[in-house]
Amino acid sequence: MSNPFTSFLSQWLADRRLKEFVAYWDELEATVVGVYRQKMSVEAAEPIFERVWPWLRVHYEEWADLIRPFWLRTKAGGQPVTQDPFRLLLSLQHPQAIKGNWQAMQHLPAAREALNQFILSRARQE
């Protein structure tokens, strides 16, 4: 499921690689939220995890330096973010690691905010 605001911002993007990254990130976010809130079982999350996390780990490197200034301006748990929220979420090694992981849940909004701000900045350039 895609984030409605991110989808709105992405409509002006011509960069297919960034749109693909956003689509994979949407899947990661939906999976983390689903497992954390126990609306998705760990077993149901496994095939998504096995497809999405490795892809994002490779392709995030293309965007990491460009997104960094945006996540540095975000907060997680009311505190300024000091570690890359994308890498934090991508460091999860299996869906079981999502269960009860409040730190991951707190960093999801920071990653989304940074992604939206990055998309907005790119859309203005295109």
Image: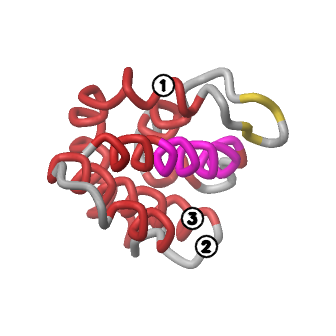
Q: Which residue is mark 1?
A: 68
**Residue type indicated by callout 3:** Val
- At x 25% / y 46%, what residue is drawn? 126
Q: Which residue is mark 3?
A: 33
Instruction: Answer few, some or many: residues within 10 Å of disc 1's Cα (few below 14, many 20 plus, some between 14 and 19).
Output: some
Left or right: 83, with 16 as reference point: right
Camera-side mark, 3 or 2: 3
SS assignment at label 2: loop
**Residue type indicated by callout 1:** Arg
Left or right: 25, with 117 as reference point: left
Q: Which residue is mark 2?
A: 38
Q: To which quarter of the image does residue 118 belong?
A: top left
Camera-side mark, 1 or 2: 1
Q: In the image, which residues are magenta?
A: 103-117
Circles 1, 3 touching at the beta carbon (< 8 Å) = no
Q: Is residue 68 inside the magenta stretch?
A: no
